Image: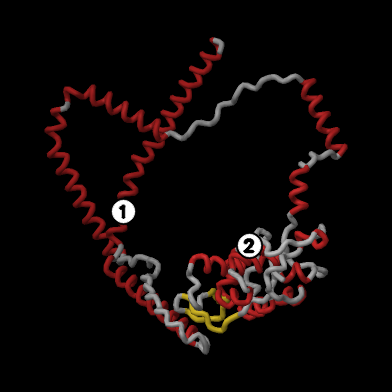
């Protein structure tokens, strides 16, 4: 770095420090001066707000909110009891006690006193505050006069403290303009000409052969196949966690919510009836009463799906995904180029054609009209 650059850096640094000191002093002075209006505003709020009346209004609002919540809870319990419970009499699971959340209403607007009453209380409070301040000044006067010989030190320390506080509160400086290096015009022209020629010829960077091969080897599954795998995966998770029990399962409404969360169904387009028809069409036995956490509703039981498949759900999901162990090797003649689009034959889940599924559920990616029966049923 040359001497000129060093001098320029020192000059810039000094100017930035002085600018920061000035701007920080303005900010600090504004904060100090803003304390007075803030104190007056706080005093007026204390004098004008009727605390007891505000508390009474808030209690009334909380009472109404609790009554409304209790009414909604009672209505929900009545609708739950309407579910038909005609099977699975051996389900004697104890309902878990539900903790009732504390229901409170939003904060209400404070109740103000009449203006004459509030003004009188504000004046009385001001008189008390002025008397307190005067008493403090009278009592502290002798001690302040004892510090007169040290006024130079006090002024120096106070000035340094002010400068440090101003620099800490100063806004960040604007980025300094960097010295722009000169570039050869001939090189710039050559680079621009080269770029223009590439754009005119329409050249695009060639894709890597490995990426293309991977994309061709792994075709994207149809939305219906993904939904079948999702349902089977949810049931396999229950089986793996040991939460299936003798008659454990998952509700149809829970399957709809999880499928919408996984972006497999368009939110709000599938109801419980349509989902039940879709599950039965694709070979998932739907039970009329499945008890989950005390709630009874239509759902899919793990043991019945396992019985329909003739194998564990984890093994069925692995075979459906193409990663399970095959029970018998397939001959080369039965493995054409379109084999990745076909589903393994070891998972015995009957299903219907594509148009019936498309009418029942609105998938995120609509199925084509000419899709094969194997791609639509998910597992066949």
Q: In which quarter of the image is the C terminus?
A: bottom right
Contact between labelled residues 2 and 1, with CB atoms less than 8 Å apart: no
- Residue at 40%, 30% (x, y): give it: 167
Image point 32% across, 65% down: which residue? Answer: 112
Asked if 14 appears above or below 237 in the picture, the reply is above
Q: Which of marks 1 and 2 is nearer the N terminus?
A: 1
Name the residue that disc number 2 marks. 318
- Residue 298 percent across, percent down from the top left: 56, 81
Q: How many labels does the image show?
A: 2
- Residue 53 in percent (x, y) is at 29, 70
Depth order, front residue of 232/47 = 232
Position of residue 8 in the picture relative to residue 211 (left or right):
left
What label does residue 228 carry, if any?
Answer: none
Asked if residue 107 lies left or right of residue 307, the reply is left
Residue in the image at 28% along x and 54% along y: 43
- Residue 259 makes an appearance in the image: no
Q: Nearer the viewer, residue 290 or 20?
A: 290
Task: Please provide percent x and percent y for residue 148.
Answer: 17, 25
Look at the image and tell me in which quarter the N terminus lies. top right
How dense is the environment of label 1, judged by Cα within 10 Å: few (below 14), some, or many (20 and up)? few
The single residue placed furthest to the bottom in the displayed view is 86
Front label number (1 vs 2): 2
Left or right: residue 58 compared with residue 373 = left
> Could you say which disc has been placed on residue 42 in the image?
1
């Amino acid at each position: 770095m040359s001497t000129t650059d060093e001098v320029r850096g020192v000059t810039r640094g000094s100017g930035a420090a002085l600018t920061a000191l000035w701007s920080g002093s303005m900010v600090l002075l504004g904060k100090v001066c803003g304390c007075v209006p803030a104190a007056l505003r706080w005093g007026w709020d204390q004098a004008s707000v009727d605390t007891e009346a505000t508390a009474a209004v808030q209690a009334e609002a909380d009472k109404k909110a609790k009554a409304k919540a209790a009414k909604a809870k009672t209505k929900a319990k009545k609708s739950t009891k309407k579910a038909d419970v005609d099977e699975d009499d051996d389900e004697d699971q104890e309902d878990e006690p539900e903790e009732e959340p504390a229901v409170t209403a939003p904060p209400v607007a404070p109740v103000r006193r009449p203006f004459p009453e509030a003004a009188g209380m504000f004046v009385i409070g001001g008189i008390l505050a002025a008397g307190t301040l005067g008493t403090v000044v009278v009592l502290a006067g002798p001690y302040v006069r004892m510090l007169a010989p040290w006024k130079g030190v006090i002024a120096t320390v106070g000035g340094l403290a002010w400068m440090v506080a101003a620099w800490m509160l100063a806004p960040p400086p604007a980025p300094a303009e960097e010295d722009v290096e000169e570039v050869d015009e001939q090189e710039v022209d050559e680079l621009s000409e080269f770029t223009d020629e590439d754009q005119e010829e329409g050249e695009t960077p060639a894709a890597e052969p490995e990426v293309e091969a991977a994309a061709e080897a792994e075709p994207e599954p149809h939305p219906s196949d993904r939904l079948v795998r999702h349902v089977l995966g949810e049931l396999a998770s229950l089986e793996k966690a040991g939460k299936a029990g003798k008659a454990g399962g998952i509700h149809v409404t829970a399957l709809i919510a999880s499928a919408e969360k996984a972006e497999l169904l368009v939110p709000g387009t599938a109801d419980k009836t349509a989902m039940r028809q879709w599950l039965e069409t694709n070979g998932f036995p739907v039970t009329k009463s499945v008890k989950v956490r005390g709630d009874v509703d239509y759902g899919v039981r793990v043991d019945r799906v396992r019985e329909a498949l003739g194998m564990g759900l984890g093994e069925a999901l692995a075979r459906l995904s193409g990663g399970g162990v095959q029970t018998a090797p397939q001959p080369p003649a039965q493995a054409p180029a379109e084999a990745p689009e076909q589903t393994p034959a070891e998972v015995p889940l009957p299903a219907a054609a594509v148009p019936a599924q498309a009418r029942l559920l609105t998938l995120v990616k609509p199925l084509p009209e000419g899709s094969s029966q194997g791609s639509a049923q998910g597992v066949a």
